Image (cartoon, grey):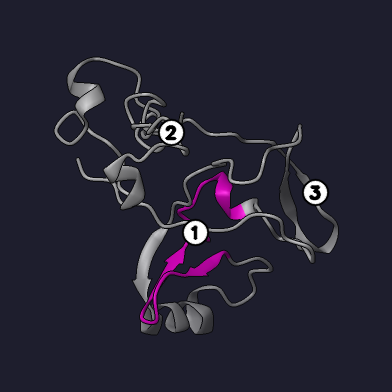
Amino acid sequence: MLKYITHVDVGCGPESNCPNRELQIECTKHTCELQRLKKKCLNNRLRKRKYNLGELRMSGKKGIGMFSLNKKPAGTFIVEYCGEVVTQKECMRRLGYDYIGEKHKYLMVLTRDLVVDATRKGNYARFINHSCEPNCEVDIANMFL
């Protein structure tokens, strides 16, 4: 007999049918039945800073890189990518003026018109995947306070 697994059964985890997770929105006490019932909800990695960081070390010409200390299953959440969200125009201005002479810049295109600039106001995530063989991907999540 097949059993329908609800998000209550697996705590809003990756295998659940949690409506918030499906919409890539973190659960809150206002939007999650489990949190309202004071039960375990796994869809709050950003808010609770549940990061899977490795160690930072030099990575040849590429500067500092983050290296995992253990094998992680595919789909494992590593860390939130933080930085200033700027327009494409502002990004180009910074590249042509502010960042002249800087060896490493950490810019990630968010949309056609927006860029996340982690060069000066970023976190450890900027050091992930500076590799010829990247093995991580970016996933956009929404978090409401």
> Callout 1: few (<14), some (14-19), or many (20+) C-alpha neighbours within 10 Å?
many
Distance from Cα at disc 2 to Cα at disc 3: 35 Å
- The three-letter amino acid code for the residue at tag 3 is Met
Residue picked out by circle 1 = 118
Distance from Cα at disc 1 to Cα at disc 3: 18 Å
> What element does badge 3 sit on?
strand
Q: Which residues are magenta?
A: 106-126
Instruction: Work out whether 118 lies above or below 66.
Output: below
Is disc 2 in contact with disc 1, using a CB cutoff of under 8 Å? Answer: no
> What element does badge 1 sit on?
loop
Residue located 68% across and 57% down the image: 129
Q: Position of residue 132 (x, y in %)?
A: 79, 66
- The three-letter amino acid code for the residue at tag 1 is Ala
> Callout 3: few (<14), some (14-19), or many (20+) C-alpha neighbours within 10 Å?
few
Q: Nearer the viewer, mark 2 or mark 3?
A: 2
Q: Is residue 41 found left or right of 139 in the rendered image?
A: left
- Reply yes or no: does residue 116 show up in magenta: yes
Residue located 28% across and 44% down the image: 20
Circle nearer the N terminus (1, 3): 3
Residue picked out by circle 2 = 13
Is disc 2 in contact with disc 3, using a CB cutoff of under 8 Å? Answer: no
Residue located 14% across and 33% down the image: 30
Instruction: Work out whether 142 lies above or below 55.
Output: below
Nearer the observer, 132 or 9: 9
**Residue pushed farthest left?**
30
Residue picked out by circle 3 = 58
- The three-letter amino acid code for the residue at tag 2 is Gly
- Reply yes or no: does residue 40 show up in magenta: no
Residue located 46% across and 28% down the image: 1
User: Which quarter of the image is occupied by the C terminus?
Assistant: top left
Nearer the observer, 34 or 62: 34
Instruction: Work out whether 90 lies above or below 74.
Output: below
